[in-house]
Amino acid sequence: MTPKRPVYPFAALVGQDLLKKALILNAVNPKLGGVLVRGEKGTAKSTAARGLAELLPPIATVANCPFHCDPEDQALMCDDCRKRREAGESLPGRARPMPVVDLPLGTTEDRLLGTIDLEKAVKTGEKHFEPGLLAHAHRGILYVDEVNLLDDHLVDVLLDAAAMGVNVVEREGISFSHPARFILVGTMNPEEGELRPQLLDRFGLCVEITGLKNYEDRMAVVERRLAYEDDPEKFAREWEPEQERLRGNILAARQRLAEVGFDPAILRLITAVCLEQGVDGHRADIYMLKTAQTLAAFHGRGRVGVEDVKEAAFLVLPHRLRKKPFGEAGIDRQNLEEIFQKHREEQERAYTPPGPAAVEPDSRSEETRSIGEVTAAPADPFPVKPLEFAPDRQDRQAPGSRTRAKSRDQTGRYVRSGLTRPPVPDLALDATLRAAAPYQNLRDKGNLAVAIADADLRYKVREKRIGRHILFVVDASGSMGADERMAETKAAILSLLLDAYQKRERVGLIAFRGETAEVLLPFTNSVDNAARRLAVLPTGGKTPLPAGLALACDLIKKEKAGHPQDAFLLVLITDGKANISLTGKPPMAEVKELAARIRSLGIDAMILNTERYWHEASNLPEISRIMGASHYTIEKLRAGDVVARIGAALK
C-alpha cells in the first residue's frame, strides 16, 4: 500500500497570522462557532484547514461506530453507543486521525444530513439510517469552500447543526438524531456574492485575508512550497518540532480552558464594545466572551484580561458590524481605543451603560467634474416594495423572492412524492415502500424482503428557490445630467439593490454613453460592487442606445444559459434619444431590431422614459411594444415613481 503523502505542515504557513489564530482557537474550543474566511483565492485557506487537522492528535473512537463516538464521553455518543454503555458493555476503542470532511458545492440535502440505507431497506424491509457528511465530520473539521454559493437551505441546516452540536433528521418516514460537533471552516470570495446577514451572524469568528505584500514573505512562500513538493517527508520532518510545540500549546489550552474565569468588569467591557460599535443582537457578546476566555487559556492565563477582549473583538465583530449594505464593514479603531481607555479610567468607579452608537456622517464625496462629464452623487435610497417576477406556466407556484420552483435535478428540499418520473430519477423510497406494502402477500418475493412493482414507484418532488436576475441598462448620456435625473435614477437603483441584497438576487449593470456601452458589473450577488460602480458613473456625450441593448442581449443570453430556470428582468432607463449607430443603419431601426431580439429571450422587461415632457415623436412606446415591455413616461424622474412603476410592471 502506498504511504500517505504528508500534509503541508500548519507551522510552515507564512504570514496569515489572523487566520492561523482563528483556527487554533477553534481547535482549543470547538464551541466558538467556527470561522468564516473571506478573501482571495490562493491564500492558503484550504491548506491551513487541512494542516490544522494534522496538527491535532488522533481521536479515540468507538470501533465500527459511524459517528466516531468518544468511548469515554457520553455527551459525544450516539444513541446506540450510549445504550451499549448503559447496559454495562465495554465499548471497544480505536484511535483514528482527526477527520477532515469537504462539503462540495453540489451536495444534496440527503448527502449532508443522511438518509435511508437503500440496500438494507430492500433486503430486510426495514428502515436504516445511512449517515451523511455531518456524521463523518463529528469531532473533526468540516471544510466548506465557497460557502456563499451553497443553497440557502443547506447553509441553514449546516449552521443549525454547528450551533446545537446535534444533527436532527426528520424525513422519509424516519426520525433520527446523532451528535455532530465539528470545527466549521467556511471560505468565500466576497466578489462572488455575500452570505445573507442572518447566516453571516451565525459564524462565531471571521477573518479577512489577502495575498502577502512583503517581498520576503512572498519569497518564503515559494521556497517552502518548492521544498515541500520536492520531498514532502523531509519537509514535514524539519517542521515537526514546531508542530509539536503548537500541538502541546493547544492540548494545554484545552485542559486550562474550563478554569479560565472573568470579572464582571470584563463582561461590562464586552457589552460596551458591542454597543458602541453598533452591533445588533447578542451573539457578538457571547462569542466575544468565549473567544476571550479561549485566548486567555492559549496564552496560559487563568483570567480574561483587557488585551484578550481587544484581540477577540477583531475576530468576532467585523462581519457583524454592517447595519446595511453599501457601507464599509470594519471596526472603528478610534472608537475602540476610546472604549478601552474609558474602561481603564472607570474600573474603580460605577459603570454607566454607554449610549447608542453615533451615526457616522455621510461620507459621499461631492460631484466631481471633468471635461464634458458630470458625476452626480446618488440621492438617499429608501425602502421599496418587493419586486414580483412573472411566474412560469408550470414550475413557479407564487411570486416574490421566496418563490419556489420544482427542481429539475436532485438539488433542493424534498417536499413530497409523486408518480411522475423526473428526467433524473430520484426515487422516494419511503413512499415506494408504503405503496408496495399492501401487496406483499400476493407477490413472489424470492429472496427479497419487499417485492416492488413498477406501479409502486414514487419519485421525490423537490423544490428550491428561484434565482432572480435584474439587469439595469442605464442611459448615461449628457441629457441624463439635466434636472437631477441621474441623481434620482441612482437613488432608485440603489433602493432596488437594497431589496436585492436582502433576497440574494443577482444584479447586473450596463451603462451607455459617448460612442459605446460598457458592462459596469456582470451578474453578481455582490450588490456592494454594483453600488460602488453606480456611485462613480458619470454622465456626458451622445446616446448609443443600440450598443446598450446589444450588450444587454448578449449578457442575458449567457446568464440564461447557465440558469435556465431562473427569472430575469431587464430595466431600461433612458430618454430614448438614440443618435449613435452600431452598423451604419439608422440608430432607431437598430433599436427596434434589438428590441425584437430581447423579446425572443422570453424575459420580463420594462422601460422608464426619463424625458421630462411627453413628445408624440418619441419612439419608446413603439419600442416597448416590440420588446413586450411595460413603458412609463414621467414628467420628472423621482425615485419613488421609479419604484412604484417597477413594482406595478412586475406584478
Image (tube, rainbow, N blue to C red):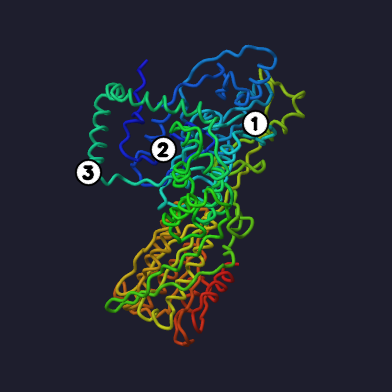
- Camera-side mark, 1 or 2: 2
Which image quarter: residue 593?
bottom left
**For the residue marked with disc 2, what is the amino acid?**
Lys
Q: Are marks 2 and 3 in contact (CB under 8 Å)?
A: no
In the image, 555: left or right of 232? Answer: right
* Residue indicated by mark 1: 177
Which image quarter: residue 413?
top right
**Element type at marker 2?**
helix
Query: Is tag 2's residue or tag 3's residue first in the polypeptide sequence?
Result: 2
- Give coordinates of residue 120: x percent, y percent: 63, 23
Query: Is tag 1's residue or tag 3's residue first in the polypeptide sequence?
Result: 1
Q: Quadrant of the C terminus?
A: bottom right
Nearest the viewer among 253 and 386 is: 253
- Identify the residue at image location x=67%, y=28%: 452
* Residue indicated by mark 3: 215
**For the residue marked with disc 1, what is the amino acid?**
Ser
